[in-house]
Image (cartoon, helix red, strand yellow):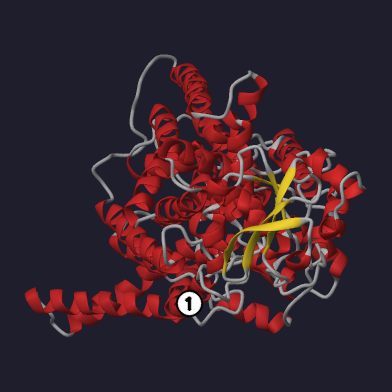
Amino acid sequence: MTWIDLAIAGALTAAVVVLPGIVLAVVMGLRGLGSWAAAFPFGVTVVSTASVAAPLIGLSWSPLPVVLVTVVFAAVIVAVRFAANRGWRFRASQPVNRGHWVVAAVVAAGIVVAAQVVVVVGAPDNISQTFDNIFHLNAVRYALDNGNASPLFVGSMTSTSGGMWFYPTAWHAVAALVVQATGASIPVAANAMALVFSALAWPAGAMWLTSELFGRGRSTALGAGLAIIGSASFPLLMIDYGVLYPLHMGLAVLPAALALALRALRITSPGRLPMALTVVGTLGTLPGLAIAHPGALVAWIVFFSVGIVFTAVRAWNGSRSSGQRVLVVLLVGTYAVVAAAVWWVLRPPAAARTWEPEMTVAQALGEVSFASPYRAPLALLVAILMIAGVVWALRARRRAPLYAVAALLAVGGLYVVVAALPYLDVRDVLTGSWYNNLPRVAAILPTAVVPLAGAGALLLSSGVRGAARRARLRGPLRAVATAGVLLIAVVAALLPMRTPIDTAQANYTLNADSPLVSADEMALMRRLDDEVEPDAVIAGSPWTGAGLAYAISGRKVLQPHTLMDITSEMTAINDGLDRAVPGGSVCRAVDDTRVRYVLDFGTREVHGGNHPYPGFSRLAASTAVELVDQEGDARLYRIVGCA
């Protein structure tokens, strides 16, 4: 695969999400940056809804359900708009010809983030050499093979008993459409997804949120752009750690979803959109967040709850009667009950929420204060901008800036809780929705930091302009000085990113020592579609990466993931394949499961663990199998002992 293949896959990824989303945004009345940014959460909602609806109406997973859902949602928006306006009147929610600096900042930040992602990935078809990637890549293949990308179905890949009745599959649904449309490999589609949501969705949404809170000035755009390219904990951390592709998607579209929600709460100006449309648009982002990843929806609840407090206080102070105040209390109480219920229901099982605190409270507070969570290198410029933004917001004493400060305190508080709180039951209540896992909460922080960095640039730029006036800089000299300051700022933002980029890049490097799949193992898996019959199943330890043969070659495997229901047939094969004899229990299991081959990738596991598979440990000396292909120490055997 070449970089051109990745570019094509990236373009199709953007099209799959943006085209339905932009239709809804434009019909709703959004224009300019707002329509582009909102297209991503809207598009994710369309794809998510289509993935659920398609099997219910007898359709296989393809672009057709996406088109149908887009038409239905557009019709709903048209009906709401017609009712709200008492007629058909389209007026842009904001002038299209304003905010050129904001657009320029979005483009520039997107280019830089795209370059960062390309450096991390290293090659178009490299894979993340991490534990969770076994499931994610195989789940895309499973959706393609079954024509079903529903969150109510894909979990059956590893839970045939129905124990995993829901799994967030928006990411897998989009990736499957990209593979269908382009013929790209699943690894290329995964990297295209990382590129699009990192470099297109995230900068646009973060910049729109900043503009909604602090305006669309040059300084604001510059400060937000610097924070976008200089934040280590998002988006790169989510394509490094885990790998957490679904949460990466959800958090990438979170700022745009939040920008709409703040309009609905009147924290920011609603523009010319009727309240009904703003509310419908806000609600329209929620299914996408939930089916991208529930952790993204709970993050939205955090930001929205802060806004609810501001709106409730304003409504209380503006109430003219006790009845109105009772209504405020009832509405806020109802929201609190619903939010708490969602917060509780969306928590993963207790067995998955086992991460412990990793640092002291003082260290966690320091990481939040310097905008450098999860032990990232000190992002000094971003920290200065953020702190200056807090100062500017407190001085302004307006609702939107004060909201931004409160949101930072809320998210920062959650980070301190998950990182350091020793009271584990309280910690579990507050951060269990993110598995009590520090990196997941760290990835939320930039959504609060970026807007304040934009505000900080407002404060600092006034000082810079004052210094320029005192120095009597004019004409070309002032232009050169401005360019110099800008260059220094960009370099200062990017320098701390070197370590996070290098760390993430190590997880995509394909060589003899790669932790999940080595170069030899990958080369062998890429030949499997020529050596293994389409209806045959391949056995092998998923802990060694052998399970990824499903995603890479398209040939079915006995265990597509490490964490799955293990049947008695699987146990018989895993424990005794090397001793298989005709008529024995192993051969009966082989016949029942259609296992015809076995991959031997040795004993090195992705996490350096030890999960013995006795039936695969002595294959080289077994008469039950014969060698078909070999690349280095990676071997493919055919089962012959059951003939």
Could you say which is closer to the camera, residue 68 or residue 532? 532
Above or below 630: residue 252: above
The answer to whether residue 328 is visible is yes
> For the view shown, which residue lies furthest in the top direction?
87
Q: Is residue 142 left or right of residue 87?
A: right
**Neighbour tally class for label 1: few under 14, some 14-19, many 20 plus, Cα within 10 Å:** few
Could you say which is closer to the camera, residue 460 or residue 528? 528
- Image quadrant in which you'd find residue 226: bottom left
Residue 203, x across and y down, in percent: 41, 56
Question: What residue do we see at 80% from left, 72% from top?
Answer: 610
Could you say which is closer to the camera, residue 385 or residue 534? 534
> For the view shown, which residue lies furthest in the left direction?
475
- Image quadrant in which you'd find residue 157: top right
Residue 45, x across and y down, in percent: 55, 36
Q: Is residue 460 left or right of residue 541?
A: left
Above or below 583: residue 80: above
Question: What residue do we see at 71% from left, 65% from top?
Answer: 437
Residue 527, x across and y down, in percent: 52, 53
Figure quadrant of the C terminus: top right
The answer to whether residue 409 is visible is no
Residue 152, x across and y down, in percent: 72, 35
For disc 1, the marked residue is 502
Q: Is residue 39 left or right of residue 323?
A: left
- Total marks in image: 1
- Image quadrant in which you'd find residue 325: top right
Type of amino acid under label 1: Asp
Mark 1 lies on a secondary structure that is helix
Above or below 415: residue 349: above
